[in-house]
Every structure is written in structure tokens, then in C-alpha cells.
Image (cartoon, rainbow, N blue to C red):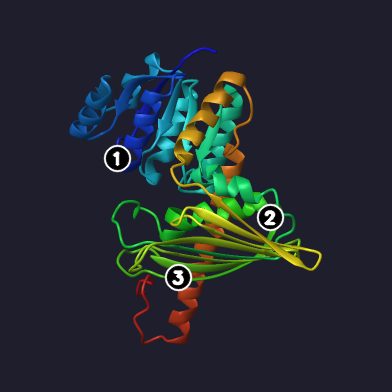
Amino acid sequence: MSIIRTAVIGAGHLGKYHARICAELPAIELVAVVDVNEATARSVAQEHGVPYATDVRDVLDKIDAAHVVVPTDKHFEVTKLLLEAGKHVLLEKPMAATVAEADELLALARRADRVLQVGHVERFNPAILGIQKVLTQPIFIEVHRLSPFNPRGTEVGVVLDLMIHDLDIILHLVRSDVEQIDAVGVPVLTDKEDIANARLTFANGCVANVTASRVSAERMRKIRFFQSDAYISLDYVAQNAKIYRREGWQILDEVINFSGEQPLQKEIQSFVNSVQQGTRPLVSGEDGRNALAVATRVTEAVYAHLQRLKQLHPGAAVPGVKEG
């Protein structure tokens, strides 16, 4: 298999990890690190002994593929440029700022016949892969993804910043259309929702209750699945999944530990495999678009609820709703 000449576009917190893994994998040649902040680009590039640039256009003729790890509001602009230049792209989540942008990127990838993979890294968690052997027909799903405040990622609300991870997992595992969404949320430290709860009802009867916060005192990452013959609890912080199954009159339990695993490395290797073999990525552009579409509906429901609160309490200050 040929070596994939790759650039990492965006050398911030997550981009550094992408650069490190690209430098380590034998199937990748890390050609350059690109960031609009020259000092950041230089620092990460020097760590791996490669050139740096501040404009993606300066490396287009040197690469076969790129990892786009820039802020969400720049995803469309950068990825469009790369696809139009005929490059394969691993694009961090959320895929774009709007569904319309995502649709345009999908069309560009199809026309260019290039791999467009979206970075929903939780798909590559061994526990998520492990629970699928017993997950058949979930009836109820409960999710908590809570974090202390971090200014990184606040160009979007918590639904696109954090909740979208779990929305992608739920869509992947339930495999049914979302019929109804009810959601609430509140801006606390930014001008967008910082905590939100959504209730999704699927056409097959499954219901998912999803909470995301970036203003919590403690960190929590839990997802629980309930079905007629099993209860499955996955804890990303404890790095394990507990599976309780009913077989006859017995309850059988199993623990899947995934401490030390590197889901991001698995994600990048999956991208490499798709590029080399010309196969559909595990997390395709279509998957990223679908998660974005549901996240957008959740966000719209959050702000519709805030507007209703303003109508019910006209004299009150409602966070996230501008006067007039």
C-alpha cells in the first residue's frame, strides 16, 4: 500500500494529537502542520520534524489527504478547498456549521471521488464496539455528558460541541428515523446554550434522553441502554462497560475494560484504510451529516423553548433571548 502524504490543518488542542498519531503511523507521511497562528504551527511542526504553514493553499501540491481540526465555523471553508483540490479529508465533528454546508461538502466529495470521513471518535471506543454484540433492540437510552467549563469549542453551543457525540452513537445503534424532538437548554457563561437536555422519540418506539453540559462542577460521560433482555451501562471516565443480560431465570454480567486504548488512533487508521482501499469510511460524510441534522433540530427546539418562556414571562430576563 502506498504511503499517504498528509497535512494536519489546525494545531490546537486536538490537532496536536492528530499530528502525533500521523507522525507515528507507518502508512502516513506527515508532510506539514498548518495553523493560522504561526507560533502554534511552528511549535507542533518542529516537534515532529516537518515543515509548517499558515495557509492550507501552501501545502495543497504536497499532500494526498488532510485532517481538518480547525474551529467549527471554519470547517466548510477549509474542507471545500481541500475537496476541490482532490484531497481526501478526515474532518473533525461537527461536520459543518449548517446542514446546507454539510450537503455541499458531500456533493463535492462525490464529484471528486474522495474519502470524506467525519471524526466522531466515540464510534471507535472498544466499549461501544463491544456492546454491539448484545445490543439488539434498545427501548430506552439515557446519556449524561457533563464537563467543567472550557472556552475551547464555544464558537458553537453545547449541542454541537458535546451532545453531538452521543447523537451520532444513538443514531448508529438505533437505526431508525427520529420522529419527535423535545429539548430545553440555557446559556450560562456564553451567548449559546451551555447546558441542554433533549428527548428523542424514534419511529421504532425507542426513546433517548440526552443531557449535555459544559458548565458542570464534575466530569461525567455515561450512556445507558435498556432493552427487554439486557441493561448496558458504559462509563467513558471509568473506561469500562457493564453488561447485564437475562438468560432464562439467570442474570449474567460482563465487564469490558478499555483502559489504555486510543480511539483516535483507531479512527485515523480507519481513515487510512478507506483511502488506501477505496472503501466507505466507518463514519462517513453521510453519518456526519445525519448527526448534524439531528443536532440542529435539537438546537432549534432549545431556542424555541426559550422563546416560549419569554412569551410566558414577558417581564423576565430569559437567557439567550434578545430583547426586541
Q: Which residue is mark 3?
A: 185
Q: Is residue 266 left or right of residue 16?
A: right
Q: Quadrant of residue 247?
A: bottom right
Look at discs 2 and 3 and give the one toward the viewer: 2
In the image, residue 225 above or below residue 27: below
Camera-near label (1 vs 3) is: 1
Q: Relative to residue 66, is residue 198 drawn left or right?
A: right
Horizontal and vertical percent for residue 256? 57, 51
In the rendering, at what x and y percent does residue 299 appear?
Answer: 49, 62
For residue 114, say whether it is visible: no
Residue at image mark 2:
174
| Percent x, y of residue 320 | 37, 70
Name the kind of residue labelled 2 in the image. Val
Q: Which mark is residue 45?
A: none
Give the farthest residue toward the right: 248
Residue receiving disc 1: 12
